[in-house]
Amino acid sequence: MNEKINSLQSKNSVLDAMVVGAGISGLYLLHRLRQIGFSCQVIEAGADLGGTWYWNRYPGARCDTHSLEYSYSFCPQLQQEWEWSERYPSQVEILRYLNRVADQFDLRSGICFNTRLVSADFQPANNQWHLKLDPDQQLSCRFLLMATGCLSSPNMPDIEGLKTFKGPIYHTARWPQSQVDFSGQRVGVIGNGSSGLQIIPELAKQVKQLVVFQRTAQYAVPSGNRPLDPQEVAQIKADYPGFRARNRQQSSGQLSNVETCQQSALTVSPAQRQQLYQASWQQGGFVFYDTFNDLMTNQQSNQTAAEFIRTKIGQIVNDPQRAKLLSPQHVMGCKRPALENGYFETFNRPNVDLVDISANPIQCITTSGIRLRRDQEYLLETIVMATGFDAMTGALMKIDICGLNGLSLKQKWSTGPHNYLGLSVNGFPNLFTITGPGSPSVLTNMVVAIEQHVEWISDCLQYMAQQGYDRIEASAEAEEEWVQHVNRLADDTLYTSCNSWYLGANIPGKPRVFMPLVGFPPYAEKCRQVVEQNYQGFILS
């Protein structure tokens, strides 16, 4: 039994706030809520802190945001003292950083590990949430803060025979704590999104034979990862506050040291356009996707970037047929763009096979491998699922959350997520979601998005305490207007032009709704205006 929670039960006390999840959001929430004097408890399903960086420890796991930007900004001393080693931090380094933060601010004392929220039922008589936990425990809180993460609920495809395979099956999002030795094995990888692009080159170096089962080719540009230049670090740290401020003025909440392009891909000559794409390609990172300002709003402009990447793939991959299979044909960026470290070069290795399962889908998993519909079977000793996540809503929908009048969140969101500012749901008082659908979340530097949300929520709770309010929820009108606003912004882009996890298209039966909000600075400004106008769109009582 959990001693911390048992202690709360024995005192028959009601927490001010329960935080679900001990990742980047949960840790910062705990710190902020303690600062304003709230009693707060964090529960975490995992055995330790770190969230996505605790679970996703597969070979090659790495962040695709610059390390000097993928970090907390709330403590100047921490910013100055912590030393990142690479341009893009590895999973190991990020987890070490988060443990340092937890130790420095004594956060572990407020976290209950190996504890999962099973259900939450709002009690309007006393404006409290009644919580059932696993292991079997119950308690109550005034505010329920869901720091469950956007990419935290693994998507395990329902393939016939999955449980009959005699060898191990690993999912990149639930990787073993101990190192896995693939030496001399025949290994199959299903999936080639961001996780697949990272793990495939690493597995290819270890295994006897690697078979990559690809349904959709992916756009990817070189990350340009490298050890950090001490001079570059010193320059940024000399004006870290200014660096962070510029950071938050970018639509993606990152790349503050890159000048924003103000021209269309169609306003320059073909030769100049190629030259600019080449410069971005060589620099590496997401700067490529910002080479011109209309790549996600103008299909003709987008096509010029897509063709540049396809040409690069053709130059890197020796086998023309294989290069063609690896060359995506959908709109660039409508699926999450990726960075790569030797991914395309991997397919020049003699021990790597590429199987097109769009032309010949997987029929089933057998005891000894994977069989395709046209009677072709690949004998394997290990299978790796790089099949991603039930993004943005998956973790929330796995919990039985019940608001006013017996309405469950599953019912409320049966046709897609409805909320206000990605923060609050009408009919579910005193419930907040961190970087939820309807907020910039996955279209930004996640730490920037998280900090903005955590600070807004903690300021709101402090305001409520000062004003004597004990209940808050989004109004139905504000919620409906916000959902329409999110849809309008998405419709003005090319993001909705293909099936992607942005729309929930990777999960059978999930409503097809574009979930994140496009553009961080206008969103942050809207949140600020809501506060200035006495929490416009919220019902406080």
Image (cartoon, rainbow, N blue to C red):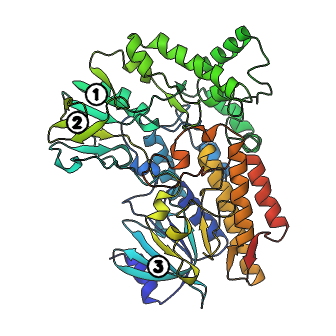
- The spot of residue 524 in percent (x, y) is 75, 53
- The spot of residue 45 in percent (x, y) is 39, 63
Considering the numbered disc 1 on the image, is that residue within a helix, a strand or a loop?
Answer: strand
Considering the numbered disc 3 on the image, is that residue within a helix, a strand or a loop?
Answer: strand
Residue in front for this viewpoint, 2 or 237: 2
Q: Is residue 524 above or below residue 293?
A: below
User: What residue did someone put label 3 on?
Assistant: 131
User: What residue did someone put label 2 on?
Assistant: 370
User: What residue did someone put label 1 on?
Assistant: 211
Sequence-wise first label, 2 or 1:
1
Q: Nearer the viewer, mark 1 or mark 3?
A: 1
- The spot of residue 157 in percent (x, y) is 34, 47
- How crowded pointer 1 is (Cα within 10 Å; few <14, some 14-19, many 20+) is rated as many
Sequence-wise first label, 1 or 3:
3
Q: Nearer the viewer, mark 2 or mark 1?
A: 2
| Tag 2–tag 1 contact (CB < 8 Å) | yes
Question: Is 217 placed left or right of 307 in the picture?
Answer: left
- The spot of residue 486 in percent (x, y) is 69, 53
Q: What residue is shown at x 53% (from left), y 85% (from top)?
A: 14
Q: How far apart are marks 2 and 1 (CA)?
A: 10 Å
Q: Which amino acid does label 1 sit on?
A: Val
Q: Is residue 221 visible to us here? A: yes
